[in-house]
């Protein structure tokens, strides 16, 4: 399962990129507004940092405007993906943009029925929102599982992206259910690597090493200072 960041913050994207496991970024209007930056400059910079798809959201809900916005968003960079909400006009715009070779991430998906529509419209990615379903006492993992099962049964090529992730177990469950991608806030991304036994084990290895180092003879040059 590919790991994406759900952010428009450049520092977070640069830091996650350093780990070597970042495969893409998703942004939305709320995340972009938080950065108080110029929209185009910011999205271009994100696209240039990330080696993978960067979803950039449209801001309209009529078919013609969505198609016009989609074409301009796709022109921002080769890795730009157009994010469109799952509405009747959004589906029509997805079909049109897809026929022009433009990649669409169908967002604000909350049911398997909507995910079937997204795939039929030719979306490159479908984004079911886990956290927001949990917030209204609906089992988000059941919905995600249904989508993965239906996509397998039907042979849909649309990639399933688990969105609205709130904690590391959402990521683990999404992987078990067969999601292709999970997008998450930076704090969840950081929490994936954290384990107290890793920290404790590392400290112990290092203290044993420092204590014994004078008696270990010749060391590789890069280990002499450690
Ligand atoms: O970008 C879409 C989605 O991941 C938003 O998540 O936390 O605002 O529900 P959230």
Image (tube, helix red, strand yellow):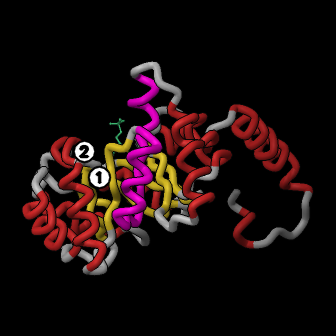
Assign the N terminus to one quadrant of the image.
Answer: bottom right
Q: Which mark is residue 130?
A: none
Q: Is residue 122 above or below residue 6?
A: below
Assign a secondary structure to mark 2: helix
Residue drawn at (42%, 29%), measured in percent from left and top?
Answer: 133
Magenta: predominant secondary structure element? Answer: helix
| Ligand 1's quadrant | top left
Residue drawn at (13%, 60%), measured in percent from left and top?
Answer: 63
Question: x, y percentage for residue 93?
Answer: 21, 63
Q: Is residue 71 above or below residue 209?
A: below
Residue 113 is a magenta residue:
yes
Q: 109 or 202, which is in the foreground?
A: 109
Q: Which mark is residue 27?
A: 1
Local packing at callout 2 (Cα closer than 10 Å; few below 14, some 14-19, many 20+) is some
Please report contact status of discs 2 and 1: CB closer than 8 Å, yes or no: yes
Residue 66 is a magenta residue:
no
Assign the C terminus to one quadrant of the image.
Answer: bottom right
Residue drawn at (16%, 73%), measured in percent from left and top?
Answer: 71
Q: 40 or 86, which is in the foreground?
A: 86
Q: 155 or 174, which is in the foreground?
A: 155
Q: Is mark 1 within 8 Å of ligand 1?
A: yes
Question: x, y percentage for residue 153?
Answer: 62, 58
Q: Is mark 2 within 8 Å of ligand 1?
A: yes
Q: Is residue 49 above or below residue 178?
A: below
Q: Is residue 201 left or right of residue 85?
A: right
- Start and end of the magenta stretch? 111-135
In the rendered image, which residue does mark 2 sit on?
A: 31
What number of labels is visible?
2
Assign a secondary structure to mark 1: loop
Local packing at callout 1 (Cα closer than 10 Å; few below 14, some 14-19, many 20+) is many
| Separation of marks 2 and 1 at Cα, in angstroms | 6 Å
């Amino acid at each position: 399962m590919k790991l994406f960041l759900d952010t428009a913050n450049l520092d977070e994207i640069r830091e996650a990129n350093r780990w070597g496991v970042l495969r893409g970024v998703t942004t939305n209007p709320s995340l972009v507004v938080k950065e108080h930056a110029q929209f185009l400059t910011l999205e271009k910079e994100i696209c240039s940092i990330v080696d993978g798809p960067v979803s950039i959201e449209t801001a309209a809900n009529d078919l013609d405007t969505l198609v016009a916005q989609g074409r301009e968003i796709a022109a921002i960079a080769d890795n730009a993906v157009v994010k469109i909400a799952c509405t009747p006009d959004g589906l029509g715009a997805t079909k049109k943009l897809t026929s022009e070779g433009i990649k669409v991430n169908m967002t604000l998906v909350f049911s398997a029925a909507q995910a079937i529509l997204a795939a039929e419209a030719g979306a490159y990615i479908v984004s079911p929102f886990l956290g927001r379903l949990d917030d209204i006492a609906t089992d988000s993992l059941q919905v995600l599982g249904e989508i993965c099962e239906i996509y397998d049964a039907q042979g849909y090529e649309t990639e399933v992206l688990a969105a609205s992730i709130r904690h590391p177990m959402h990521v683990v469950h999404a992987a078990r259910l067969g999601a292709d991608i999970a997008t998450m806030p930076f704090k969840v991304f950081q929490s994936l690597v954290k384990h107290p036994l890793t920290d404790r084990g590392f400290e112990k290895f290092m203290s044993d090493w420092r204590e014994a180092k004078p008696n270990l003879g010749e060391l590789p040059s890069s280990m002499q200072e450690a």
